[in-house]
Amino acid sequence: METRLVNSLDFARANFESYVEALSQLIAIPSISHEGYDPDAIRRAVEWIEGKLNSLSMDRVRVFQTSRSPILFAEKLAPAMGKPTILIYAHYDVQPAEPLEAWDSDPFAAARKDDYLYGRGSSDMKGQFLACIAALEAIQQSGELPVNVKFLIEGDEETDPEPLDSFIKEHAEVLECDHCLNVDAGMLRQDLPAIVYGLRGAMSVTLNVTGPDHDLHDGMYSGVVENPFHVLARLIAGLQDENRRITLPGFYDDVREIDANEHAAAERHPSDADYYRQASGSPALIPDDEFLPIERIGARPSFNVRWVEMGAKKSAIPVSARARLAFRLVPDQDPDRIYSSLVDYVMQNAPTTVSWSFENRVSSPGVLVPVESDAVRRMQAALKATWRVDPLLQRIGGAIPVVGELQDYLGIDSVLTGFSLPDDNIHGPNERLHLPTAQRGIEALIRYFFLVGEQA
Ligand SMILES: [Zn+2]
């Protein structure tokens, strides 16, 4: 295997420009899964990926329609019997690029500057997905696959977990595998790869507060008729105390204690308070003398208002005001329970001067994956051989719903890593991919596929 590994690594290095070219093509397809964007771009992204998978000569490539964007499934069996099966997860959808004027280049025309490739999806996660493809291409040019490979590629990761959730429930058999490889989790610094073992879940929902049945002249009505925004603002403010602890009854009941080992690791973690202050550009962080910032991000729940909407900019009392409320949750917290206590809270605290409703609820539970598995150990070895440093094991604050779905429905654990960096501006303007890191990522993946293939 040594020669094959060397050949594959050489091939990947020599052909890195084809990776950049493929990524540029995929960036040029604005596959935004949000409501109101061109559904044809989703179709073209699916076609492009189908072509790419076929060029890898997969045994089977299938496109499944869902209630929203199609899901692609593909598989290729290694010729040797009894090899482990890796299910590679990816998503081809991206966030909208607005505000477009904040970009220095066209978000949907890849632009190369210094060591970076700019464009929507370059880092989240078209570049990550294509790193897996590039690794497999490099391996296949020197011989057969050392493992069985399956692909599960969805197009609604940025918007709605439901289509994938149903797909996983209904296709347990085709998804059968030893573990899932998910390269959507990112790393911390160019010189420090990471494996993620904990993810926060989330429960987000829109709260609508409605007042008068038409916009009212505020000179003629204010002081008599309630402004729904004022009620909304009071409700939001009441969800946290002065220490930003969430006030919903029982909210913290199921939150696991951080054990001594985890706390020691958090103390060594490079993301300290200075890091968060600098990375966020905030004047100061929320004070907390109980938990380190990295613990608050990875192992503690939090509350955030994502957006607020109310009347036009005119002198009026608006008909309604709405806000998107988002709770980040940790393992053992039940999103449904959090939602019902939120409903109770509004029921008890909203005055009779308004009516209210909740809509568009999305939730996923927090997840922990075992760190002692063979698969994680092999990924650790692959990352270490590539970066020449022990990878960081960490919990992160974001949700990757597929990890929990695979675990809950099919008992499949995921190996979570990735080659995106905190300053890649994912979801923001000027999203970019650090190309030397992507190149190392491809090399690490090549090593990982071979290492997993060596398994008895
Ligand atoms: Zn994303």
Image (cartoon, rainbow, N blue to C red):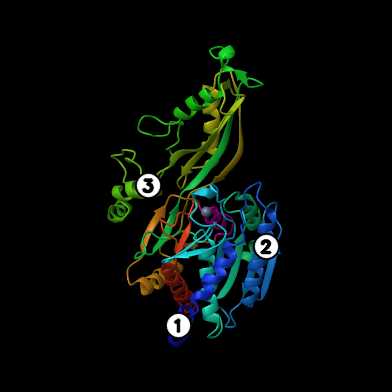
Residue furthest to the bottom in view is 3
First of labels 2, 1 by sequence position: 1
| Residue at image mark 2 | 44
Task: Kindly check if marks 3 and 1 are in contact, taking CB atoms under 8 A apart as contact.
Answer: no
Pick the front one: 217 or 450? 217
Q: Which mark is residue 10?
A: 1
Indicate left or right for 262 with 107 as reference.
left
Crowding around mark 3 (Cα neighbors within 10 Å: few <14, some 14 to 19, many 20+) is few
Q: Residue at x 37, y 47 (%)?
A: 280
* C-alpha distance separating marks 3 and 1: 39 Å
Regarding residue 456, the answer to whether it shows in the image is no
Report the amino acid beneath label 3.
Answer: Ser
Q: Which mark is residue 289?
A: none
- Disc 2 residue: CB within 8 Å of ligand 1: no
First of labels 3, 1 by sequence position: 1
Report the amino acid beneath label 2.
Answer: Arg
User: Foreground mark, 2 or 1?
Assistant: 2
First of labels 2, 3 by sequence position: 2
Pick the front one: 73 or 411? 73
Whole-percent x, y for residue 343 in the image: 56, 30
Mark count: 3
**In the rendered image, the vertical position of residue 218 relative to residue 279, given as above or below:** above
Secondary-structure class at tag 3: helix
Indicate left or right for 165 with 18 as reference.
right
Q: Residue at x 53, y 12 (%)?
A: 223
Q: Residue at x 70, y 61 (%)?
A: 64
Regarding residue 286, the answer to whether it shows in the image is yes
Whole-percent x, y for residue 82 in the image: 56, 78
| Residues shaded magenta | 400-411
Report the amino acid beneath label 1.
Answer: Asp
Secondary-structure class at tag 2: helix
| Residue at image mark 3 | 280
